[in-house]
Amino acid sequence: MKKVIIATILTLMGVMAITSCTEDAKKGDRLTTMLIIESSQDLIDVCDIQITYKGKGGVNTIDTITTTKWHKIIVNDSFPTKIGLVVLRYLVKPGFKPTKDFYNLECRYRSTCKEQEHRIDYYPLRMPDVPGDKIASILEMENYMHKDTEEREAKQEVFISSIDIVTKAKNGSTGDPFDIKFEGETDSSSVQLVEEQPVLGPDHVNQQAPATTNNK
């Protein structure tokens, strides 16, 4: 009986060792990011929130928030990629009429990663004691101020503080599986989020080169 127990224990230890090795081998193959939006009840009573964030592959993805707590999990397995919040738009509910004198308009954004310690935490909107009859115009102005954010971000004309570029870490550089940097710290022009194009041959390059004029 003792031999059976010992054999069972050794088998389990072997399985655990194999699993551990497998997990170590896969370290750095994927990054799991959780995005969280927490809003005041007043804000949700007044409007729906349209959120644009970086989905899998760094692609801009749109969702609508209608509750005080919202979260989304994004798993990336191809790098480099982008993660984070692009922009929020506050869509005042049709027919909204204030029922009290003042409202607390508050929205908090958080982002965390599972495989590596990384966190962003700030308030995209924090306006206490907003007069009820001013809410619609204030949120309209807030949307107007950020209406070009998504387009300008796509053109790399503006860097958004909550967007990070993720690349696989170089061996021995940090001990972490990924390098995660605010996109303003990265030369975005060198980061390709699409399939690389083949290198052109010298013949093709010569054909495309502009003709030179001999001024001698």
Image: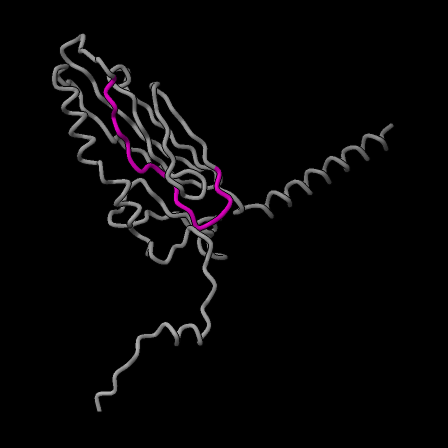
Provide residue 176's location: percent of width, then percent of height.
Answer: 47, 48
Q: Answer with left or right where residue 123 lies relative to residue 18.
A: left
Asked whether residue 34 is drawn in magenta, I would say no
Provide residue 209's location: percent of width, then percent of height.
Answer: 34, 74
Which is nearer the eye, 64 or 30?
64
30 lies above or below 48: below
Residue at image point 69% right, 43% down? 18
Provide residue 15's location: percent of width, then percent of height.
Answer: 71, 38
Residue at image point 38% right, 48% down? 165
153 lies above or below 145: below
Q: Quadrant of residue 63?
A: top left
Q: In the picture, which quadrant includes the C terminus? A: bottom left
Asked whether residue 86 is drawn in magenta, I would say yes
Q: Answer with left or right where residue 93 lies relative to residue 7.
A: left
Residue at image point 21% right, 31% down? 143
140 lies above or below 185: above
Magenta span: 75-93
Which is nearer the eye, 142 or 165?
142
